[in-house]
Image (tube, rainbow, N blue to C red):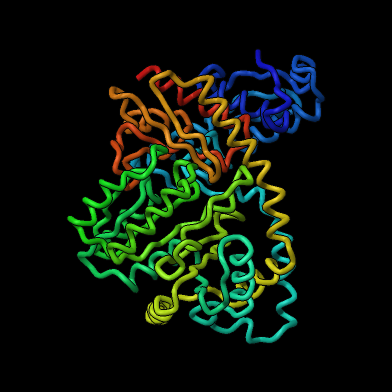
Amino acid sequence: MNFELDEGSGPAYRQIAEKIRSLIVDGRLMPGSAIPSVRVLARQLSTSSLTVHQAYKRLEMLGLIESSPRQGSRVVDQIGGLAGKAILGQVSSEGPMPEFEKLAFSSGVRSMASSVGDPALFYPEEFLAFVEPLRRDTPWNFYYAEPEGDPELLHQLARLLTRDVLPTNESQIVATTGSTRAISLILDAVASPGEAVLVQTPARLWLTEMFRAKGLLGVPFAYEGEGVGFDYLRTCIERHKPRVLLVSPDFGHATGLVMSEADRLSCVQLAREAGMLIIEDGACAPIRFSSSRPPSIASLAPDICAYVGSFSYTLCPGIRTGFARVPPLLRSRMVEASQATGVSGPKFLEVAFARYLASGAYDAHLRRVLPRYRARRDAMVSALSLTMPRSVSWTHPEGGFSTWLRLDGHVSTSDIYAKALPRGLAFAPGKLFLTAADPERRLRLSFGMLEPSAIRESVLELAKLILAD
C-alpha cells in the first residue's frame, strides 16, 4: 500500500481506514485479497501498531475487511460497502435519504448528501444529565406541552435570541419540533392554497414537497453569490402577488454564503412595498466560521419578519427542537394552527433542553465543534481546488455545512449521481432543490458528517467521475 499520512487531515487511524476503503471501493483491492499485517503496515507508514489496529477495527465495523489470528487481515468476499452496492441499488435515485448516513456507519458508503450536524460530535451524556432528574421533579413535566412551548424553554430561547439575533421576550416565540415545523405553521397561518411564496434558492430539499402539499406556488430567485436580482424580484411580485418572502441570508442550506447587509435592507424595502411577510430561515446561522455578522433581517424589520431557528443543525438532527420568533398576531395564529393539529413537543424534553441551555452546555458545544466543522470546510475547499477540472466552480462556505457546485454544459449531475452511488458515494444533485438555476448543472456537497480524510477521498472520487463523463 503506497500512501502517506497527513498531520492536518484528522486522526491517523481514520486516514488509514479511508485510504484502504478507497482502494476497496475502486476495485484496486479485490474481494478476498490479503492486506498487510498490523505490524507491517505500521512500519511502512511510520506509525504505531495501535493506530493501524484501530484502522482495521473501523474497516471491520464497516464490513470491508475481516481478520483472524491464522490468516491475518483480508478484504471480505462479500464486500459490505458494495452491498452497500446492493442496498444502494434499491435506494431511489431521486435523491439523498437518511439511509445514506446509516450506510456510512455500516458499509463502504461515504455520504455528502445531508447538510446536517454530525451526531458523533454531540455529547449525549451532557443532555441526558438534565433528563434523569425530572423523574424526581413535578409529574406535570410528563403532561402535554403547551402549544406555544414550555415556559422554561421559551425563557431560554428568548435569552438566546436577545443575545445573538435581536431583543426578544417569551411572548414572541413559538417552540416547535424543528424549523421545518415552524415554517409549516407560519405558512398555514398566512398563505392560502393557490397563493405564491417567493423563495431564495437553492432552498431546502423538502420545500417543493411542502408547497405541493399545501397547494402553494414556489417562485424561486437564485442566490449563488452574485447578489440579489431585485429587478427580477419585482417582476415576480407583479406577476405572482406573493404573500411571503422566504430567505436564508446566513449560509442557506446549500451554498454557505452570507447575504450582504445592503441586500438584506433591499429585501426589507421590497417586502414593505409589496405587503409581504418575510420568513428568515436562520437554522444554520450559528455554524459560522468568522466573527463578522451582518444584522439579521428580523432585527431590521421585526414587525414584518418571522425568524426561524433550529438546534437540529447546531447540536444534532435528532434533537428535534426549533422555534419561530414572530409578530404578535402571527403568534396567536400559529398557536391556533398547532392546537388544531394536536402536535406539540414532549414537555419533559422541552424542560430538560431549557435547563441544558441555561447551564451553558450549548455554548460549550458550539465552542467545541465549530473548529471541527471549520477544518472539514477547509478540507472540502482544498480538495475541490486540487482535484476538480477548471470547468467546475463552487461557493466558498462562510458557514453551514455545504458548498454548491456548478458544472459545465456537457456534464449532467443526474448522470454523475447514478455513477457515484455504486461507487459508495452519495451527494445531493441539483434537481432535488427548488432552484432558479439549471438543476442538471448544479449539485450540493455537504461536509458536516465526514472527517477531513474522508472528505478528500470523496472529492477525489467525484472529480474522477466528472472528468470521465
Where is residue 390, by image quadrant? top left
Please name whichever residue, 268 or 382, is drawn nearer the observer in this view of the structure.
268
Q: In the image as oriented, which residue stretches furthest toward the left? A: 239
Please name whichever residue, 366 or 145, is drawn nearer the observer in this view of the structure.
366
Q: Position of residue 175 (x, y in %)?
A: 52, 72
Q: Position of residue 261 (x, y in %)?
A: 47, 49
Please name whichever residue, 196 or 446, is drawn nearer the observer in this view of the structure.
196
Q: Position of residue 362 (x, y in %)?
A: 68, 60
Compared with residue 32, is residue 104 higher up or lower down, i.e. above or below?
A: below
Placement of the C terminus among the 4 image quadrants: top left
* Residue for point 37% across, 81% down: 340
* Residue for point 25% across, 46% down: 232
Q: Is residue 468 left or right of residue 39?
A: left
* Residue for point 17% across, 55% down: 239
* Residue for point 61% across, 51% down: 119
Q: Position of residue 186 (x, y in %)?
A: 38, 69
Please name whichever residue, 129 or 82, is drawn nearer the observer in this view of the structure.
129
Compared with residue 316, is residue 22 higher up or lower down, i.e. above or below?
A: above
Where is residue 63, by image quadrant? top right
Compared with residue 173, is residue 258 higher up or lower down, i.e. above or below?
A: above
Q: Is residue 54 left or right of residue 194?
A: right
